[in-house]
Image: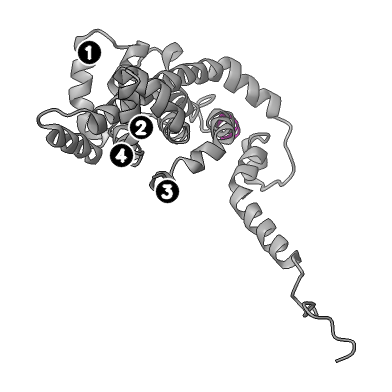
């Protein structure tokens, strides 16, 4: 029995070595990031350099930046998209909170029918309602205004369903305690429910911000003034620079346009991931 060390095992050839995992993860990360890296490379090159498969940075980055940022005013389009995304996301979140509060804590006739109709709208893509929305918004005289790309998207069936499920999983004693304290429904919402729902709010915020930021079809139809256009429509206009398709400015604009949603996701990554664990709350 001499020489034995209880609890200590000899390491095999691969046991305890983490380098294979690091190599595999590094390769996987490179494969995933390669399209973005290649787009960044193309954004610095002319068409001639791109078609010659040059793998070193080109000399046209500043020229492309001037075309994208100044000449085609991508900065203005990104500002319009930022304002639109914030207004739509905040509006959807507030209305979804109120809808979740009503569906869980209020009793009224036809509540389940209303909730069912809300769920039905989840199966209706925006493209189905485009014609009706266009006639309605045009009738209000909202063409080429921020209201045209904000108001029709303030309601969210996804958000109402998400908060309804979240509130339904919270203890019923919370409502009873607030009623004993004499809290109104809005006080119950702001002082009890919202502090317990920050993760769900963050998850909905990220989803809706990215969805609104990537909106293309509706703004292209209802907004004709280029100074009021959003970023995705501005990217479409960049397919024609100088009378031909120039890939460098287009790739640079695509990279710049991806920065704001990436920042939002990074800032809210932790609560965003936690927000989907609504089933774990009792």
Identify the residue at the far bottom of this view: 1
- Lower sequence index among marks 1 and 3: 1
In the picture, the disc for residue 174 is: 2
Residue pictured at 21% horizontal, 29% vertical: 129
| Separation of marks 2 and 1 at Cα, in angstroms | 46 Å
Q: Which residue is mark 4?
A: 168
Q: Which residues are magenta?
A: 247-253
Q: Give the SS element for disc 4.
A: helix
Residue at 64% x, 34% y is 43
Query: Mark 1 and mark 3: span between their CA atoms?
Result: 46 Å
Q: Residue at x 70, y 46 (%)?
A: 54
Q: Nearer the viewer, mark 1 or mark 4?
A: 4
For the residue labelled by badge 2, is the local secondary structure a helix, a strand or a loop?
Answer: helix
Residue 222 in which image quadrant: top left
Between circles 3 and 2, the one closer to the viewer is 2
| Picture quarter with the C terminus | top left
**Residues at marks 4 and 3, CA–CA distance in whole angstroms:** 12 Å
- Crowd tier of the residue under label 2, counting other residues whose Cα lies within 10 Å: few below 14, some 14–19, many 20 or above: few
- Element on which disc 1 rests: helix
Q: Nearer the viewer, residue 273 or 8?
A: 8
Residue 70 visible in this rendered orientation of the protein: yes
CA separation in Å, label 3 and label 2: 17 Å
Q: Which residue is mark 1?
A: 138
């Amino acid at each position: 029995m001499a020489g034995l060390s209880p609890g200590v095992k000899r390491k095999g050839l691969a046991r305890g070595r983490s380098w294979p995992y690091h190599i595999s993860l590094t390769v996987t990360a490179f494969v995933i990031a390669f399209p973005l890296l290649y787009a960044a490379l193309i954004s610095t090159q002319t068409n001639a350099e791109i078609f010659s498969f040059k793998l070193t940075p080109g000399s046209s980055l500043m020229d492309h930046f001037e075309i994208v940022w100044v000449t085609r005013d991508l900065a203005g389009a990104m500002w319009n998209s930022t304002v639109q995304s914030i207004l739509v996301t905040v509006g959807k979140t507030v209305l979804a909170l109120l809808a979740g509060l009503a569906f869980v804590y209020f009793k009224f006739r036809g509540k389940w029918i209303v909730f069912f109709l809300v769920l039905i709208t989840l199966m209706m893509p925006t493209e189905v309602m485009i014609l009706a929305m266009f006639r309605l918004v045009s009738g209000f005289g909202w063409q080429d205004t921020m209201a045209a790309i904000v108001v029709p998207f303030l309601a969210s069936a996804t958000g109402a369903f998400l908060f309804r499920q979240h509130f339904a999983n919270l203890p019923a004693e919370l409502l009873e305690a607030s009623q004993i304290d004499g809290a109104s429904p809005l006080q119950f919402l702001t002082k009890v429910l919202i502090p317990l729902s920050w993760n769900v709010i963050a998850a909905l915020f990220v989803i809706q911000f990215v969805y609104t930021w990537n909106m293309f079809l509706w703004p292209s139809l209802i907004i004709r003034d280029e100074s009021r256009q959003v970023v995705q429509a501005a990217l479409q206009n960049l397919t024609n620079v100088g009378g031909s398709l120039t890939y460098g400015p287009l790739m640079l604009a695509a990279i710049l346009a991806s920065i704001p949603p990436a920042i939002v996701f990074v800032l809210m990554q932790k609560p965003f991931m936690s927000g989907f664990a609504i089933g774990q709350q009792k």
